[in-house]
Amino acid sequence: MIRIKWPLALATLFVLLLGSYLVYTQQIRSALQSDAETLTQIFAEVQAGITDPDPSRAENTLFRLQTIIRESGVPLVQTGQGDTVLAAVNLPFEVDLDTREGQARVRVYLRELDARNPPVGSPDLLHIHFGDTPELRRLEWVPWLQAGGLLLTVVVGFTMIRYQRGVESERAWTSMARELAHQLGTPLSSLQGWLEVLRLRPAERPGALKEGEIADAIEEDLERLERVSHRFELIGREPERVSVSLKAVVGDLERYLAARLPRLGRGVELTVDVPETLPPVEANKVLLIWALENIVKNALDALAGRGGRISIYARDVGGGWVSLRIRDTGPGVDPEIRDRIFEPGVSTKSGGWGVGLALSRRIVQGVHRGRIELLDGTEGTTFQIRLPIADD
């Protein structure tokens, strides 16, 4: 599924809107500059008419002024006694002033002009009604364009965020389902194998296994199934958090891994350093062990076939927090996925489903109100988890 980079999409939309505003503003600026030039021409014509000693040329000056006014685009209507329309220029419609219908239509238009701009002159002699300049009429749209652009940005952003969250949620549930199938599949396959062994006659069983040994192995697989079921049962709920000893949590994890390191991580050394004096943390033991187990398994995958060391150590860092770090001496995390390492579907190994670290982050940050991060500048890979100290 294509992953939409909604921040980039929003940034592109913002740049396009900003560019359109700049172009629109520049057009208005050019139009206002043209108005200034028109006023300058009017002033020049008036001055020329006033200073011209030949009265016969005044008529030419008036015609030039009329041409300049017509070209300004400002609606102008001249009325006389009885609201008779004598002249009109730059109207938004074509009209014949010599007809009754034309006179009536212009008078209706005058009510619109007068509501915005009071007429000048004497109503008994000569009244001049005027409208807005084309530039002013265009400026009226600016607030609407700004509001529309902002609304469009918000709507598109909200839609993209919802879409992205939906994609991430779907990816997370898909990965979770695969992880559940994987965790259930291992003990189920083991149980199926032990069932086949039980069907053999005692003399045919490998290693001359006795029923008691087989029963112990089956019990171990059933306990694992119960543990997996209980873990996934807690997903989506608000689990209970109590005062828990972090040393006890790490101790349970150490015992669980000690029995499996010969098979899962040959040549891998596990060292644990969690002081007895460490204050208890507020946690759900089942989920916290799951989060730590996912990180350690990630480290085991990194050391597969090469050996190395996994270190787990914790310290009281003050401020009401306990810090726990899990470090391995593997090759480290690919820089291309460092920033996305905790996202669902992102895996550090080929064929992985990318749910382990995403689930660990959900447990640490969502359930325990803590923080998990991949530290920079270290050899191998180091994850740091901060958990709040339990209240007394």
Image (spheres, rainbow, N blue to C red):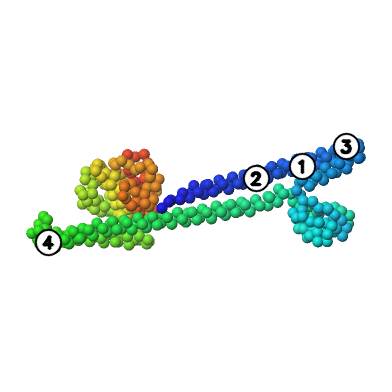
Indicate the secondary structure of the residue bearing disc 2. Answer: helix
Q: Amino acid at mark 3?
A: Thr
Residue bearing mark 3: 51
Image quadrant assignment for residue 210: bottom left
Is residue 151 shown to the viewer in this render?
A: yes
Query: Going by the image, does 85 lie left or right of 246?
Result: right
Give the alpha-carbon distance from disc 4 to disc 2, as whole Å: 89 Å
Indicate the secondary structure of the residue bearing disc 1. Answer: helix
Of the residues under marks 1 and 3, which one precedes in the sequence? 1
* Quadrant placement of the C terminus: bottom left
Is residue 386 shown to the viewer in this render?
A: no
Give the alpha-carbon distance from disc 4 to disc 3, as whole Å: 127 Å
Q: Nearer the viewer, residue 354 or 64?
A: 64
Residue bearing mark 2: 25
Residue bearing mark 1: 38
Residue bearing mark 4: 200
Q: Amino acid at mark 4?
A: Leu
Q: Amino acid at mark 2?
A: Thr
Image position, residue 293 (x, y; %): 29, 52
Give the alpha-carbon distance from disc 2 to disc 1, as whole Å: 20 Å
Q: Residues within 10 Å of mark 1 (few under 14, many from 20)?
A: some
Image quadrant assignment for residue 62: top right
Q: Residues within 10 Å of mark 4 (few under 14, many from 20)?
A: few
Q: Amino acid at mark 1?
A: Thr
